[in-house]
Amino acid sequence: DDEDEKLTRFPVMRVDFSEVKVPLIIAIWLVTACIAKMIFHHIPHLLEMFPDSSLLIMFGLIVGIILNVLHVDKSTFNLDNEVFMLYLLPPLVFDAGYFMPARQFFDNLGSILTFAMIGTTFNIVAIALSLYAVSLTGLFSVEVNVVELLLFGSVAGDVDPVAVIVIFEELGVNDVLFISVFGESLLNDGVSVLFYNIFKAFVEIGPENIITQDVVNGFFAYFIVCFGGLAIGLIFAAISAFLTRFTKDIDILNPVYVLVIPYMAFLVAEALSLSSIIAAVFCGAAMKMYVKENMPERSASATAYLIKVLSLSSETVIFLFLGLSTVSSDHHWDSSFIVLTVVFCFVYRALAVVVLCQILNKFRVQKYSKVDQFILAYGGLRGAIAYGLAVALPNFPAKPMFVTCTIIIIYFTVFLQGLTLKPIAQFLQVEKKNEHEPTMTECIYQELIDATMSGMEDIAGQKGHNWIRENFKSFNNNYIKRILINKEAQRNMDKTKIVRLYRRLQLQDAQNLVKVSGDLSKNQVFVDALLQHTKTRGSRGNTLYSSRVSFSPHDTMEQHGIVDYDIDRSPTRSIERTRSDPLSNARVEIRLSNGQHIV
Amino acid sequence: MLNISYNVVRMGNSSSLMLRDEEIEEISRETEFNRNQIVRLYSRFLSLDKKGQGFLEREDLMNVPELAVNPLGDRIVDAFFTLAGKDDKHLNFRQFVQVLAYFQPIDKSKKNQLNDRSKKLKFAFMMYDLNRNGYITREEFKVILNSMVGANITADQLDKIADRTIEEADADQDGKISFDEFCKAMEKTDIEDKMSIRFLN
């Protein structure tokens, strides 16, 4: 309308929000979500009782109600499925993959796959068929057929990685338990994506028209979805690692490669209707060890920080919008359907966990105890992905009922299970995570034990985990790393964990020594820095001449012409959740008596 | 997968190579392996004993191809033979199984003689303590460290790492690590799970 009106007078100022509407709304919501989170942090004791996610949902709910009362257009605060799947989900999933404890993941891979594939399939089918059986009695207010219910099952039946990350993180349970639930929530995406696509297609084809061929195709698609997703993830990881190999002088490009290429992996997998979550996760996990070597320290920490920022904001927005969307979606409340679904979800999950654990325990070295099994069953949380899938369902009569039910299930798991999980875990004395930094001793003996156990397995003639791990390590070192890591890093690379840990500990020592105003001459990092300086800058006016100097403990720094020193410690990421190793950047700055600076 | 025959296995005419049922019973009682596991290990024993002597020598074990490329290969074989007992050069089947029993997963409810935590740690300790005097000295430690990371660091760095590690664990400051100090240093490590093998049936 404005364009059609001819200007009669020149306006001093024009107000035209439609141009900036979409980005502005996004920005406003993002800031609102962060302000909400800030408010929660400042209210004492609130976070001890309620996990972040539940508070954000409630906040979203309240804001949604207010906006609704004010008759604000619902589309401004409805979570569009496309936005969710394409923009909000990838950072979270990539973060999960990049910081995943890879060793525990592979050690427990068999169990994780069992839960993810067999467990999830069982859940989906059982819930759907039970609901179908009940629907035959005419209890539900809307007509549903089997295929639609199977579709609903694939929405409501799987554990959600977002919810698991958020809630289990604050629990701090031991690694094996965490990785079992978390690994399951990641890999079951393969199953749920598949079932969702299959049944969505079946609904479109029309249940009467399905022939055996369709079912058989579906069966094969099972494997293609998962392995295809994995393959895509690995290919893009290799590309990303390879590209970072050549960024030596322009290391500012590194974060771009590390962040954008996995995103491409996600999108490509999505386009091929493979599992995009699996692609992104494995891209992150695979790429990490090569990319980290190719980047200088500051690039690596900047990238890690950026990943965390993106995933945290994503998560905040997701939960806020879950609250908002409760108000803005089309609902249809059917009490019996909702109650039955919730009950079935619980019951079948518990059943699946118990039965599968019995079977798995026959093969596992570290068995799942009864307490473990309870946490595994109780920790089967549903989250935002379920909502996204529900909203994206094709428009058949039962859809609003499904959407409402999904939201209720999510509320149920986030509030009931989320709130009570921590006290229950404490009550049952679940083993907590081992939070301490490994000492040199532990690190060395760890390597020793790995090599020993690999040898023992060889003697006993069995190819177990240790054999696989050690063989992969040598293959990795001899072939893959040669291709993907740049030449200079290869030469300087501390190929083993031991040396890397040693360096890290020395750096920490340097910082500690300075705090106590101690004698730095004993610290190797300090000595190295000094020697490096004398080698490269020449010894003009300097008391050090030779390139090989050893300090005796009794030398003081004045004797070596060092007047003052300062350690500037750039802030470690003070984010509430640090799932990776703490990175600290320490710069040692020394002023020599001749006025020169060493950094 | 190895094809397991559950009957008595005979090789050559030497009667010492037959595994009698009573022997299986005894070994099972001693080591807590079940019958199938023992028979399977016996198959393995025979395949390692290429000369058909009825016992294993050091070279028999070193002939395992993966062991030859393992940086700690010879140390493992040494520890194996030393733990087996009296005769340092020959390993019969019973001793073979006894040492492997150390690496059974620990059933936390039962208190088992052969495979509990201290026995596993003892094996690890023996890998370092080359002269078997009950202490790990700085020199012995450097030897092991060298075989694990030697190619990648300078001699100086090796010294420093060794020094630091010894310092960390050396409670009584005598410059060497005793078995007790070793156990204390490994307190927080999950030895029960890390030093266990799942023996197949």
Image (tube, coloured by chain):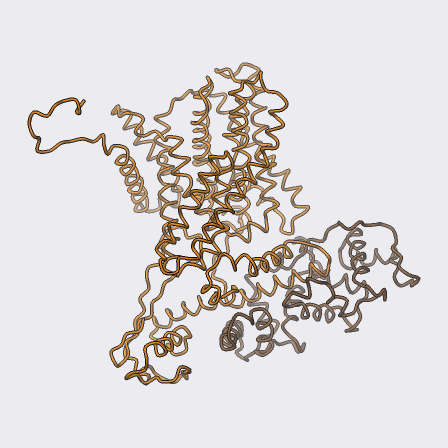
Chain colours: A orange, B brown
Q: Is residue A284 above or below residue A7?
A: below
Q: Quadrant of the N terminus of chain A?
A: top left
- Taking the image as shown, residue B106 lies to the left or right of residue A341, namely right
Rendered image quadrant of residue A392:
top left
**Looking at the picture, does residue B147 appear above or below residue A454?**
below
Residue reaching furthest to the left: A9
Q: Is residue B160 above or below residue B67?
A: below
Q: Give x and y (percent) for residue A74.
A: 31, 25
User: Can you give x and y, in whole percent of width and height, for residue B152 in the image?
Assistant: 53, 70
The quadrant of the picture occupied by the C terminus of chain A is bottom left
Q: Residue at x 40, y 36 (%)?
A: A86
- Give me the residue at 47% from left, 34% from top: A271
Relative to A252, is A157 on the left or the right?
A: right
Residue positioned 40% across, 50% down in the render: A257
The reply, left or right, for residue B119 in relation to residue A167 is: right
Question: How far from the left and from the top, in percent, is residue A217?
Answer: 60, 28
Nearer to me, B146 or B184: B146
Taking depth in this image into account, of B105 and A523 the one nearest to the observer is A523
